[in-house]
Image: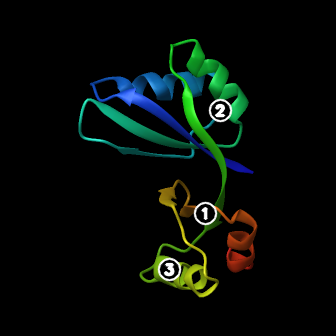
Amino acid sequence: MAFDLVIDVENTPGALAQVAAAVSDAGVNLAAATCIGSGERAELHILVPHPEAVRRSLATVQLAVTREREVVVVGVEDNPGVLADLARKIAGAGINLDLVYIATRNRVVFGAPELDALRAALDGST
């Protein structure tokens, strides 16, 4: 399983380093990260296999996971049109995505309220 954790951070130099160090100190591999926010605060999404250890480690540096959820991670070929094909499958199943980002090792992370339906729509794509 894979989990998307959201951490609200100050948008300052070193914020990402602090989170990455805490994840590393927990012995967890950070499989992806994306950050949204251009003001004083930013929303950092990280992809990890073990959220419990990350939550504990972040607490030691006074950071907290504000949201956490399971996501679907699909291995893909690094070719034009791959994301479009997957998005068409998902749309064809009537699923509305609310999260998508790219992870290490040619993988795409998808989130949707209907996780089981998302998995079914992507069956054979993982």
Looking at the rendered structure, the secondary structure element under dot 3 is helix
Give 118 or 81, whichever is nearer the viewer: 118
Answer above or below: position of 62 versus 30.
above
Q: Rounded to the nearest whole Å, what is the CA distance between mark 1 and mark 3?
A: 19 Å
Looking at the rendered structure, the secondary structure element under dot 2 is loop
Badge 1: few (under 14), some or many (20 or more) residues near its Cα, within 10 Å?
some
Of the numbered discs in the image, which one, if any, rests on residue 112?
1
Residue type indicated by callout 3: Val
Discs 1, 3 touching: Cβ within 8 Å: no
Q: Quadrant of residue 49?
A: top right
Q: Is residue 124 left or right of residue 102?
A: right
Q: Of all residues shown, which one is farthest toward the left?
A: 39
Residue type indicated by callout 2: Val
Report x, y in % for residue 123: 74, 77
Give me the residue at 60% from left, 75% from top.
95
Q: Is residue 43 visible?
A: yes
Report x, y in % for residue 45: 49, 43
Of mark 3 and mark 2, the one earlier in the sequence is: 2
Residue beneath label 2, please?
28
Residue beneath label 3, please?
82
For the residues carrying marks 1 and 2, which lies nearer the camera in this image? 1
Residue type indicated by callout 1: Ala
